[in-house]
């Protein structure tokens, strides 16, 4: 029987590619989304992947959604924490709500979505959790103190939880994408986009499918890759 995989923010951009990659690898995928009903419906029609709407920033909503998925499809054995937003501003102009919204969606969501599935994973002796961070969580980015802080927190979350689940058959790994050719990135003004690409040594933006393939690799690994952060950024940032 196919393992059930939940992908947050799984109907658009990188999340859409992850959902499709997992589906093609034989998983029963449920894709979460937060607000765009039309895009989610189009995604479901195009891919045949089930969708579920809930707010990853709200713990109760996440717990209820996991319970519903478990009842309808089976226990969640693969979780991809991908959902994220930006509210960019230089810090000296940043409003409290810009900080709070990003931390809630990009970091609190990891607790909210992982907490309802982790006990079952421990009991069954198997689980695969993949968290999506960012190059800017590794190197920082001006105008994104909130986002960079949240995405750095994703890396710390990954390392700590990996140690807790290692002897229970659970792996927790992280992917830090660079600039990926999603609708959001390609909508950037051409002169700005050209400047971004000029800073990427391989000379191009990444493709969302490249992130999807790394997710599948980590999910299907037999368990010795754990607590890792894998950079997928075209050599834009190298860390020791």
Image (cartoon, grey):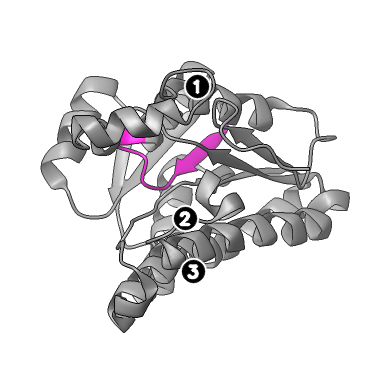
**Considering depth in this image, is 56 or 175 the residue closer to the camera?**
175
Most extreme residue toward the right is: 167
Q: Is residue 101 above or below residue 203?
A: below
Task: Report the residue at 44% width, 61% height from top.
Answer: 147
The answer for how far apart the CA atoms under marks 1 and 2 are is 23 Å
**Which of pointers 2 and 3 lies earlier in the amino acid sequence?**
3
> Does residue 57 belong to the magenta stretch?
no
Image quadrant holding the N terminus, namely top right
Is the residue marked by circle 3 packed among few (<14), some (14-19), or many (20+) residues within 10 Å? many
Image quadrant holding the C terminus, namely top right
Q: Secondary structure at mark 1?
A: helix
The answer for how far apart the CA atoms under marks 1 and 3 are is 26 Å
Is the residue marked by circle 1 packed among few (<14), some (14-19), or many (20+) residues within 10 Å? some
Task: Report the residue at 37% width, 40% height from top.
Answer: 10
Residue at the disc numbered 1: 210
Q: Quadrant of residue 97?
A: bottom left
Labelled pair 2, 3 in contact (Cβ < 8 Å):
no
> Does residue 6 belong to the magenta stretch?
yes
Q: Secondary structure at mark 2?
A: loop
Residue 134 visible (yes or no) = no
Q: Is residue 240 above or below residue 63?
A: above
Span colored in magenta: 3-13
Residue at the disc numbered 2: 141
Residue 90 visible (yes or no) = yes
**Residue 86 in the image: x percent, y percent?**
33, 57
Q: Nearer the viewer, mark 2 or mark 3?
A: 2
Q: Quadrant of residue 142?
A: bottom left
Q: Secondary structure at mark 3?
A: helix
In the image, 178: left or right of 197? right
Q: Nearer the viewer, mark 1 or mark 2?
A: 2
Residue at the disc numbered 3: 108
């Amino acid at each position: 029987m196919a393992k059930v995989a939940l992908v947050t923010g799984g109907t658009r951009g990188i999340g859409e590619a992850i959902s499709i990659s997992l589906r093609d690898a034989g998983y029963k995928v449920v894709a979460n989304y937060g607000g765009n009903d039309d895009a989610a419906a189009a995604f479901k029609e195009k891919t045949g992947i089930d969708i579920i709407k809930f707010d990853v920033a709200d713990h109760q909503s996440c717990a209820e959604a996991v319970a519903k998925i478990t009842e309808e499809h089976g226990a969640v054995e693969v979780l991809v924490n991908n959902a994220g937003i930006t509210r960019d501003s230089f810090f000296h102009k940043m409003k409290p709500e810009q900080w709070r919204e990003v931390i809630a969606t990009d970091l609190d969501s990891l607790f909210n979505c992982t907490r309802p599935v982790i006990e079952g994973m421990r009991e069954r002796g198997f689980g695969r959790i993949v968290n999506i961070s960012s190059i800017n969580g590794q190197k920082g980015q001006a105008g994104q103190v909130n986002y960079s802080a949240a995405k750095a927190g994703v890396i710390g979350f990954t390392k700590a939880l990996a140690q807790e689940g290692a002897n229970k058959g659970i792996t927790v790994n992280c992917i830090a994408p660079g600039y990926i050719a999603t609708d959001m990135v390609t909508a950037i003004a051409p002169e700005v986009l050209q400047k971004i690409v000029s800073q990427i040594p391989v000379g191009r933006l990444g493709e969302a499918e490249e992130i999807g393939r790394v997710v599948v690799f980590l999910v299907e690994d037999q368990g010795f890759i754990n607590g890792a952060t894998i950079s997928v950024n075209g050599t834009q940032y190298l860390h020791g």
